[in-house]
Amino acid sequence: MVRKQSQWLLIGAVMLALLVVLAGCTPPAAEKEETKKEEPTETVYLTFASGSVGGAYYSLGGAIADTMSRTPGFQCVSESTGASIENGRLVGSGESQFGFMMSDAAYKAASGIDPFKEKVPLKALFTVYPAPQHILTLKGSGIKSVLDMKGKRVSVDAAGSGCEATSKEILKAMGMTYDDIKVAFLSQPEAATAIKDGNVDALFWNFAYPGAVVLDVASVRDIELIPLPEDVMDKLAAEFPYYRKGKIPAGTYKGVDEDIPALEVGNVIVVHEDMDDELAYTITKTLFDNVKSLAEVHPAALQMDPETAWQTSIDLHPGAEKYFKELGTMK
């Protein structure tokens, strides 16, 4: 009897030892949880509405798309467009998630003012850079002011672009309409070719300086930039909240040896008003964190100033507002 009890005690001790060993080989639940691989986050696909080939919108748009695509969880492409007016339609309809607009075009879109038939649901992320209106002709054209364009062949930029809208307002402020000129609606590359070949006498362009197409024309032709009278710029700035007086500095282009008074308009990045706040915040922060790499593509990016970038012609998106308030530049 004693022997049997001893056998059972021995068997029990062995089983207990085995259980202890097995328990030691099994990782705790918490450790199991730690070893699980993180589930990959869903990729956010974005389309950026930029502008026509040759302008700052096109160059910077590509750089912005590349920057967002290098950000984990994002894939972004830049789409060549007719610029501001078309971009407002694309972003407002959701076909593009964000894009460039001149501040005057953005104001008109959000307000439902011509050329927009109704209010477009847009908000701004920030003002990227100011852009002066370039009014260009060739030396020997006989054009020294906008008034001298009467009866001349003039490109006012692509139809429906923000630049075209500004060109029309400048002519109106000078007491002119399209009926006073032989109007052409040419994209920037088309206009550059046309003036080099003598098929237009003057043209209107709006972009940050130095503009690639102006540099191109100036490399093969002697150019002149037409200044706007101070009183005309004062009149436009008083009438429209998105204009201000500016200049194109002397030496920016070959043959331009003095400052050229020019009407200036801001260029903003717009999004749909229903964009997720966190997405708007991430886009804004990512672009400001990468100003240097953006400027390697176009120097206009160096004018991205967080101290003033939140000042836009339309309401700021709450996600962008969060970013500027975190920086302390916006109260």
Image (cartoon, rainbow, N blue to C red):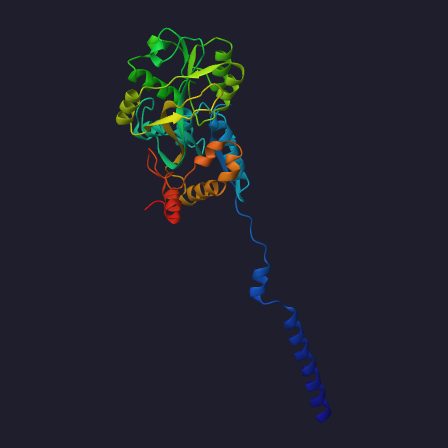
Percent x, y of residue 183: 39, 11
- Residue at the image position 39 percent from the left and 42 percent from the top: 320
Of 227 and 109, nearer the camera is 227
For image coordinates 43% across by 30% down, the residue present is 100
**In the image shown, does 267 or 322 lie closer to the viewer?**
267
Residue 186, how many percent across, how many down?
A: 45, 15
Locate the N terminus by quadrant: bottom right
134 and 289: which one is in front? 134
Residue extending farthest to the bottom is 2
Could you tell me if residue 161 is visible in this image?
no
Q: Quadrant of residue 12?
A: bottom right
Q: Residue at x 53, y 34 (%)?
A: 296
Q: Where is 268 relative to 280, above or below?
A: above
Residue furthest to the front:
257
Instruction: Specify the farthest residue to the top.
Output: 151
Q: Whole-percent x and y of residue 318?
A: 36, 43
Residue 117 percent coordinates (x, y): 32, 23
Q: Does residue 106 appear anywhere in the picture?
A: yes
Q: Is residue 303 above or below residue 1?
A: above
Q: How many marks?
A: 0
Left or right, 286 with reference to 119? right
The one nearer the camera, 314 or 177, is: 177
Name which residue lies at 36% across and 39% down. 308
* Residue 267 shown left or right of residue 293 in the figure: left
